[in-house]
Image: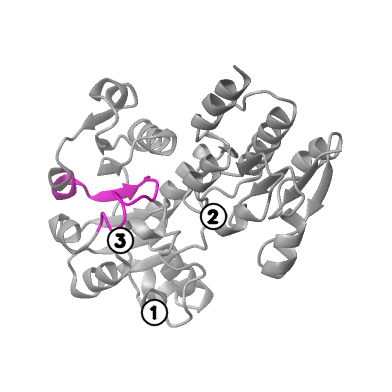
Amino acid sequence: MPIVVVSSPIHPVGIELLRRHCEVREVHDGIVSPTAMRDALRDADGVIVRSLEVTAELLAQCPRLKIVAKHGAGVDSIDVRAATERGILVANSGNANALGVAEGAVALMLAVLRRVPEVHAIVAGGGFAAKRPTLIFDALWEATVGVIGFGNVGQSVAKMCGKGFDATVLAYDPAVPAETMHAHGAEKMDDLAALLGRADIVTLHLPLMPATRHLIGPIALAAMKPGAILVNTSRGGVVDEAALIHALCDGTIRAAGIDVFEQEPPAADNPLFSLPNVVLSPHVAGATWAARRRAATRAVEAVLAVLSGRRPEYVINPDVLAQARAEVA
Protein backbone atom coordinates (compact mmCIF):
# COMPACT_ATOMS: atom_id res chain seq x y z
CA MET A 1 0.00 0.00 0.00
CA PRO A 2 1.41 3.46 -0.90
CA ILE A 3 2.60 5.66 1.96
CA VAL A 4 1.43 9.28 2.14
CA VAL A 5 2.62 11.82 4.69
CA VAL A 6 0.26 14.60 5.76
CA SER A 7 2.51 17.32 7.14
CA SER A 8 -0.18 19.61 8.63
CA PRO A 9 -3.73 19.08 9.87
CA ILE A 10 -6.28 18.90 7.06
CA HIS A 11 -10.06 18.43 7.01
CA PRO A 12 -11.13 14.93 8.17
CA VAL A 13 -12.89 14.34 4.84
CA GLY A 14 -9.48 14.34 3.15
CA ILE A 15 -7.95 11.98 5.69
CA GLU A 16 -10.85 9.54 5.39
CA LEU A 17 -10.56 9.51 1.59
CA LEU A 18 -6.80 8.99 1.75
CA ARG A 19 -7.03 6.11 4.25
CA ARG A 20 -9.18 4.10 1.84
CA HIS A 21 -6.25 3.80 -0.55
CA CYS A 22 -3.02 4.53 1.34
CA GLU A 23 -1.11 4.18 4.56
CA VAL A 24 -1.40 7.65 6.09
CA ARG A 25 1.25 9.18 8.31
CA GLU A 26 0.09 12.34 10.02
CA VAL A 27 3.42 13.91 10.96
CA HIS A 28 2.83 17.60 11.50
CA ASP A 29 5.45 20.22 10.75
CA GLY A 30 6.21 22.43 13.74
CA ILE A 31 5.24 19.68 16.17
CA VAL A 32 7.71 16.96 15.28
CA SER A 33 11.43 17.58 14.83
CA PRO A 34 12.93 18.06 11.34
CA THR A 35 14.63 14.69 11.78
CA ALA A 36 11.29 12.97 12.48
CA MET A 37 9.79 14.64 9.42
CA ARG A 38 12.67 13.44 7.23
CA ASP A 39 12.33 9.93 8.63
CA ALA A 40 8.60 9.90 7.87
CA LEU A 41 9.20 11.08 4.29
CA ARG A 42 12.14 8.82 3.50
CA ASP A 43 9.98 5.98 2.14
CA ALA A 44 6.86 7.99 1.32
CA ASP A 45 5.23 7.93 -2.10
CA GLY A 46 3.42 11.22 -1.62
CA VAL A 47 3.18 14.17 0.74
CA ILE A 48 0.47 16.75 1.38
CA VAL A 49 1.86 20.05 2.63
CA ARG A 50 0.54 23.35 3.91
CA SER A 51 3.49 25.20 5.46
CA LEU A 52 6.29 22.62 5.27
CA GLU A 53 9.39 23.92 3.46
CA VAL A 54 10.04 21.36 0.74
CA THR A 55 13.66 22.04 -0.13
CA ALA A 56 15.99 20.42 -2.63
CA GLU A 57 17.86 18.88 0.30
CA LEU A 58 14.68 17.32 1.66
CA LEU A 59 13.64 15.99 -1.74
CA ALA A 60 17.06 14.38 -2.19
CA GLN A 61 16.30 12.21 0.84
CA CYS A 62 12.96 10.96 -0.54
CA PRO A 63 13.79 8.47 -3.32
CA ARG A 64 10.23 7.08 -3.58
CA LEU A 65 8.42 10.42 -3.63
CA LYS A 66 6.18 10.87 -6.66
CA ILE A 67 4.07 13.89 -5.72
CA VAL A 68 4.05 16.94 -3.47
CA ALA A 69 0.44 18.13 -3.16
CA LYS A 70 -0.12 21.63 -1.78
CA HIS A 71 -3.15 22.15 0.44
CA GLY A 72 -3.78 25.63 -0.95
CA ALA A 73 -2.62 27.62 -3.94
CA GLY A 74 0.81 29.16 -3.26
CA VAL A 75 3.81 26.91 -3.88
CA ASP A 76 6.58 29.33 -2.85
CA SER A 77 7.48 26.99 0.03
CA ILE A 78 8.23 24.18 -2.46
CA ASP A 79 11.39 23.99 -4.57
CA VAL A 80 9.51 23.25 -7.77
CA ARG A 81 12.66 23.22 -9.88
CA ALA A 82 14.29 20.59 -7.68
CA ALA A 83 11.12 18.51 -7.74
CA THR A 84 10.97 18.70 -11.52
CA GLU A 85 14.61 17.63 -11.84
CA ARG A 86 13.78 14.57 -9.75
CA GLY A 87 10.62 13.76 -11.69
CA ILE A 88 8.38 14.61 -8.74
CA LEU A 89 5.05 16.14 -9.65
CA VAL A 90 3.89 19.25 -7.77
CA ALA A 91 0.18 20.04 -7.68
CA ASN A 92 -1.93 22.51 -5.76
CA SER A 93 -5.60 22.83 -4.84
CA GLY A 94 -6.51 25.30 -7.56
CA ASN A 95 -9.13 27.81 -6.47
CA ALA A 96 -10.29 25.75 -3.47
CA ASN A 97 -9.74 28.53 -0.96
CA ALA A 98 -10.18 31.51 -3.30
CA LEU A 99 -13.56 32.56 -1.95
CA GLY A 100 -12.35 32.19 1.63
CA VAL A 101 -9.31 34.39 1.02
CA ALA A 102 -11.43 36.91 -0.86
CA GLU A 103 -13.88 37.10 2.04
CA GLY A 104 -10.92 37.49 4.40
CA ALA A 105 -9.58 40.40 2.36
CA VAL A 106 -12.94 42.16 2.35
CA ALA A 107 -13.31 41.48 6.07
CA LEU A 108 -9.96 43.22 6.70
CA MET A 109 -11.06 46.16 4.56
CA LEU A 110 -14.19 46.55 6.67
CA ALA A 111 -12.37 45.97 9.95
CA VAL A 112 -9.95 48.79 9.11
CA LEU A 113 -12.58 51.16 7.71
CA ARG A 114 -14.95 50.57 10.65
CA ARG A 115 -12.09 50.45 13.21
CA VAL A 116 -13.47 47.22 14.59
CA PRO A 117 -10.76 46.48 17.20
CA GLU A 118 -10.98 50.04 18.51
CA VAL A 119 -14.75 50.17 18.81
CA HIS A 120 -14.86 46.76 20.47
CA ALA A 121 -12.36 47.99 23.05
CA ILE A 122 -14.43 51.15 23.61
CA VAL A 123 -17.62 49.24 24.39
CA ALA A 124 -15.87 46.54 26.43
CA GLY A 125 -14.11 49.25 28.41
CA GLY A 126 -17.27 51.08 29.35
CA GLY A 127 -16.92 53.96 26.93
CA PHE A 128 -20.18 53.42 25.01
CA ALA A 129 -21.86 56.70 25.96
CA ALA A 130 -18.78 58.93 25.98
CA LYS A 131 -17.28 57.83 22.67
CA ARG A 132 -20.38 57.14 20.59
CA PRO A 133 -20.93 60.74 19.35
CA THR A 134 -17.33 61.00 18.06
CA LEU A 135 -17.23 57.76 16.04
CA ILE A 136 -17.59 58.31 12.29
CA PHE A 137 -16.20 55.84 9.77
CA ASP A 138 -15.10 55.62 6.18
CA ALA A 139 -17.04 53.27 3.94
CA LEU A 140 -16.28 50.55 1.45
CA TRP A 141 -19.52 51.53 -0.27
CA GLU A 142 -18.66 53.44 -3.48
CA ALA A 143 -14.92 53.47 -2.67
CA THR A 144 -12.28 52.87 -5.33
CA VAL A 145 -10.61 49.50 -4.78
CA GLY A 146 -7.35 48.63 -6.52
CA VAL A 147 -6.82 44.89 -6.96
CA ILE A 148 -3.21 43.89 -7.66
CA GLY A 149 -3.07 40.35 -8.99
CA PHE A 150 -6.15 39.12 -10.82
CA GLY A 151 -6.21 35.37 -10.39
CA ASN A 152 -9.02 33.46 -8.69
CA VAL A 153 -8.83 35.45 -5.45
CA GLY A 154 -8.46 38.83 -7.13
CA GLN A 155 -11.42 38.13 -9.38
CA SER A 156 -13.58 37.15 -6.41
CA VAL A 157 -12.58 40.29 -4.51
CA ALA A 158 -13.43 42.40 -7.54
CA LYS A 159 -16.93 40.89 -7.73
CA MET A 160 -17.55 41.24 -4.00
CA CYS A 161 -16.47 44.87 -3.93
CA GLY A 162 -18.07 45.87 -7.23
CA LYS A 163 -21.38 44.08 -7.02
CA GLY A 164 -21.66 43.96 -3.25
CA PHE A 165 -20.50 47.46 -2.35
CA ASP A 166 -20.91 49.35 -5.63
CA ALA A 167 -17.19 50.11 -5.53
CA THR A 168 -15.18 51.22 -8.53
CA VAL A 169 -12.69 48.39 -9.09
CA LEU A 170 -9.33 48.90 -10.77
CA ALA A 171 -7.07 45.94 -11.49
CA TYR A 172 -3.39 45.49 -12.29
CA ASP A 173 -2.06 42.21 -13.64
CA PRO A 174 -0.01 42.23 -16.87
CA ALA A 175 -0.87 38.56 -17.48
CA VAL A 176 -4.64 39.06 -17.52
CA PRO A 177 -6.43 40.64 -20.52
CA ALA A 178 -8.76 43.60 -20.16
CA GLU A 179 -11.73 41.49 -21.29
CA THR A 180 -11.32 39.11 -18.32
CA MET A 181 -11.09 42.01 -15.90
CA HIS A 182 -14.12 43.69 -17.41
CA ALA A 183 -16.10 40.45 -17.07
CA HIS A 184 -15.45 40.59 -13.33
CA GLY A 185 -16.37 44.26 -13.05
CA ALA A 186 -12.87 45.73 -13.06
CA GLU A 187 -11.06 48.31 -15.18
CA LYS A 188 -7.64 47.14 -16.36
CA MET A 189 -4.76 49.41 -15.38
CA ASP A 190 -1.52 49.03 -17.33
CA ASP A 191 0.42 51.27 -14.97
CA LEU A 192 0.79 50.23 -11.34
CA ALA A 193 1.55 53.75 -10.12
CA ALA A 194 -1.63 55.04 -11.74
CA LEU A 195 -3.71 52.44 -9.89
CA LEU A 196 -1.98 53.26 -6.61
CA GLY A 197 -2.70 56.94 -7.09
CA ARG A 198 -6.42 56.41 -7.62
CA ALA A 199 -7.34 53.66 -5.14
CA ASP A 200 -8.79 54.29 -1.69
CA ILE A 201 -8.03 50.66 -0.85
CA VAL A 202 -5.24 48.59 -2.39
CA THR A 203 -5.58 44.82 -1.97
CA LEU A 204 -2.84 42.34 -2.88
CA HIS A 205 -3.45 38.92 -4.44
CA LEU A 206 -0.09 37.89 -5.85
CA PRO A 207 2.12 34.82 -5.68
CA LEU A 208 5.55 35.38 -4.14
CA MET A 209 8.29 35.13 -6.75
CA PRO A 210 11.38 37.19 -7.59
CA ALA A 211 9.35 39.62 -9.70
CA THR A 212 6.83 40.29 -6.91
CA ARG A 213 9.10 40.35 -3.85
CA HIS A 214 8.82 43.80 -2.26
CA LEU A 215 6.63 44.98 -5.14
CA ILE A 216 5.04 47.23 -2.54
CA GLY A 217 8.06 49.09 -1.23
CA PRO A 218 8.93 52.75 -0.60
CA ILE A 219 8.21 53.87 -4.17
CA ALA A 220 4.85 52.10 -4.42
CA LEU A 221 3.78 53.27 -0.95
CA ALA A 222 4.68 56.86 -1.82
CA ALA A 223 2.51 56.58 -4.94
CA MET A 224 -0.57 55.69 -2.88
CA LYS A 225 -3.15 58.28 -1.83
CA PRO A 226 -2.35 59.73 1.61
CA GLY A 227 -5.64 58.43 3.02
CA ALA A 228 -5.39 55.01 1.39
CA ILE A 229 -5.51 51.59 3.03
CA LEU A 230 -3.34 48.60 2.14
CA VAL A 231 -4.65 45.05 2.57
CA ASN A 232 -2.43 42.00 2.12
CA THR A 233 -3.77 38.44 2.19
CA SER A 234 -1.32 37.04 -0.38
CA ARG A 235 2.28 36.59 0.82
CA GLY A 236 4.20 38.69 3.31
CA GLY A 237 7.22 39.07 1.05
CA VAL A 238 5.21 40.97 -1.55
CA VAL A 239 5.41 43.94 0.84
CA ASP A 240 8.59 45.54 2.18
CA GLU A 241 7.47 45.37 5.80
CA ALA A 242 9.96 47.95 7.06
CA ALA A 243 8.81 50.41 4.41
CA LEU A 244 5.17 49.72 5.29
CA ILE A 245 5.80 50.42 8.98
CA HIS A 246 7.48 53.69 8.07
CA ALA A 247 4.59 54.66 5.78
CA LEU A 248 2.03 53.90 8.49
CA CYS A 249 3.95 55.91 11.07
CA ASP A 250 4.55 59.03 8.98
CA GLY A 251 1.11 59.20 7.35
CA THR A 252 2.18 58.21 3.85
CA ILE A 253 -0.82 55.87 3.99
CA ARG A 254 -3.59 55.83 6.57
CA ALA A 255 -3.94 52.20 7.61
CA ALA A 256 -3.39 48.55 6.75
CA GLY A 257 -5.02 45.16 7.16
CA ILE A 258 -2.37 42.44 7.25
CA ASP A 259 -2.88 38.67 7.24
CA VAL A 260 0.62 37.67 6.11
CA PHE A 261 4.10 38.65 7.25
CA GLU A 262 7.61 38.59 5.83
CA GLN A 263 8.65 36.35 8.74
CA GLU A 264 6.09 33.85 9.99
CA PRO A 265 5.49 33.70 12.81
CA PRO A 266 6.47 37.37 13.17
CA ALA A 267 8.94 38.37 15.86
CA ALA A 268 7.47 39.31 19.22
CA ASP A 269 8.80 42.85 18.87
CA ASN A 270 7.39 43.46 15.37
CA PRO A 271 6.46 47.18 15.29
CA LEU A 272 3.19 46.40 13.51
CA PHE A 273 1.86 45.00 16.80
CA SER A 274 1.90 48.42 18.47
CA LEU A 275 0.53 50.57 15.65
CA PRO A 276 -3.02 51.87 16.16
CA ASN A 277 -3.81 52.03 12.44
CA VAL A 278 -3.45 48.34 11.59
CA VAL A 279 -5.64 45.26 11.90
CA LEU A 280 -3.69 42.01 11.97
CA SER A 281 -4.60 38.35 11.54
CA PRO A 282 -2.37 35.24 11.65
CA HIS A 283 -2.38 34.05 8.00
CA VAL A 284 -5.93 32.72 8.23
CA ALA A 285 -7.77 34.69 5.53
CA GLY A 286 -8.78 31.50 3.75
CA ALA A 287 -9.42 29.41 6.86
CA THR A 288 -13.10 28.66 6.39
CA TRP A 289 -14.46 25.16 6.89
CA ALA A 290 -15.73 25.11 3.31
CA ALA A 291 -12.33 26.12 1.93
CA ARG A 292 -10.48 23.61 4.13
CA ARG A 293 -12.78 20.82 2.97
CA ARG A 294 -12.29 21.67 -0.70
CA ALA A 295 -8.51 22.11 -0.36
CA ALA A 296 -8.12 18.80 1.52
CA THR A 297 -10.21 16.92 -1.01
CA ARG A 298 -8.33 18.34 -3.98
CA ALA A 299 -4.91 17.71 -2.45
CA VAL A 300 -5.87 14.09 -1.72
CA GLU A 301 -7.35 13.66 -5.19
CA ALA A 302 -4.07 14.90 -6.67
CA VAL A 303 -2.08 12.33 -4.67
CA LEU A 304 -4.43 9.49 -5.58
CA ALA A 305 -4.34 10.48 -9.26
CA VAL A 306 -0.54 10.32 -9.42
CA LEU A 307 -0.34 7.08 -7.47
CA SER A 308 -2.77 5.47 -9.91
CA GLY A 309 -1.00 6.81 -13.02
CA ARG A 310 -3.40 9.66 -13.80
CA ARG A 311 -2.82 13.39 -14.24
CA PRO A 312 -3.96 15.62 -11.35
CA GLU A 313 -6.21 18.53 -12.17
CA TYR A 314 -3.95 21.35 -10.93
CA VAL A 315 -0.40 20.55 -12.03
CA ILE A 316 2.34 23.10 -11.32
CA ASN A 317 5.22 21.45 -13.20
CA PRO A 318 3.79 19.70 -16.28
CA ASP A 319 7.33 19.12 -17.57
CA VAL A 320 7.41 16.06 -15.30
CA LEU A 321 4.54 14.58 -17.28
CA ALA A 322 6.35 15.30 -20.55
CA GLN A 323 9.47 13.58 -19.20
CA ALA A 324 7.42 10.52 -18.26
CA ARG A 325 5.86 10.32 -21.71
CA ALA A 326 9.28 10.60 -23.35
CA GLU A 327 10.65 7.77 -21.19
CA VAL A 328 7.71 5.52 -22.09
CA ALA A 329 8.16 6.26 -25.79
Disc 3 + disc 2, Cβ < 8 Å: no
User: Are there few (<14), some (14-19), or many (20+) residues within 10 Å of tag 3?
Assistant: few
Disc 1 + disc 2, Cβ < 8 Å: no
Residue 224 makes an appearance in the image: yes
For marks 1 and 3, give the one nearer the viewer.
1
Q: For residue 213: magenta?
A: yes
Describe the element under mark 3 as helix, strand or loop: loop
Looking at the figure, which quarter contains the N terminus?
A: top right
For marks 1 and 2, give the one nearer the viewer.
2
Q: Which residue is mark 3?
A: 136
Q: Residue at x 71, y 54 (%)?
A: 9
Pick whichever, 230 or 46, lies toward us.
46
Q: x, y (%) of residue 149?
A: 33, 40
Q: Residue at x 31, y 34 (%)?
A: 166
Instruction: State whether residue 164 is above or below residue 329.
Output: below
Query: In screen coordinates, is 5 left or right of 177?
Result: right
